[in-house]
Image (cartoon, rainbow, N blue to C red):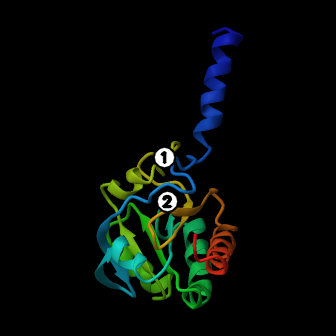
Amino acid sequence: MTRMTLFPLALVSLLAGIPAVAALKVGDMAPDFQAQASMGGTATTFSLAESLKKGPVVLYFYPAAFTPGCTIEAHDFADAVDQFKQLGATVIGVSHDDIDKLNKFSMTECRGKFAVLADPDQHIIKAYDVVWAAKPQLSSRTSFVIAPNGRILYTYTDLKPDQHVANTLGAVKQWKAQPSM
């Protein structure tokens, strides 16, 4: 192979490790959905439309339950869930995992404080365009804040879990300060 053919291959391999950037932008309508979720180890049904009637929704996608980064992120959201609730926001996590696995994850890692949604067929993951390019069977780590009117207020994609809670909490606080958004 020549250097000219190696360059595109090297570029593709480099880009394969980068998480997908959400195609949905601030101001877009969030795709509506209803799906099976687990709250505190109990299977339930989650409806985005019904949750938006109560206030904004923090919808975060994570690659897989019980992996190191996803466990950290679940702990961080569990620690902050009372702050989100004080602002009128609902937190919901979404992964490709099945409901049996999420029943355990919701009890241990989410500490029974918020629901996690099962999306084994990736219907919601694909609707939000958060399929992880490097591992298409998983979602990227992407967080959205959705206003009660169904519009996306904030979106953030980063494989590291560190800033997802702080950033989404900041976006919800900003919305609360200007609820006409």
Label disc, if present, on residue 63 of the rendered structure: 2
Q: Amino acid at mark 2?
A: Pro
Residue 58 in the image, given as x and y percentages of width and height: 52, 72
Residue 7 in the image, given as x and y percentages of width and height: 68, 19
The quarter in which the N terminus is drawn is top right
Q: Amino acid at mark 1?
A: Lys
At x 39%, y 58%, the residue is 31
**Of marks 2 and 1, which one's residue comes earlier in the chain?**
2
Specify whether 83 is left or right of 38: right
Specify whether 65 is left or right of 19: left
At x 36%, y 85%, the residue is 41
Residue 2 in the image, given as x and y percentages of width and height: 67, 8
Specify whether 139 is left or right of 98: right
Label disc, if present, on residue 135 of the rendered structure: 1
Say if mark 2 contacts mark 1, CB within 8 Å.
yes
Snapshot quadrant of residue 163: bottom right
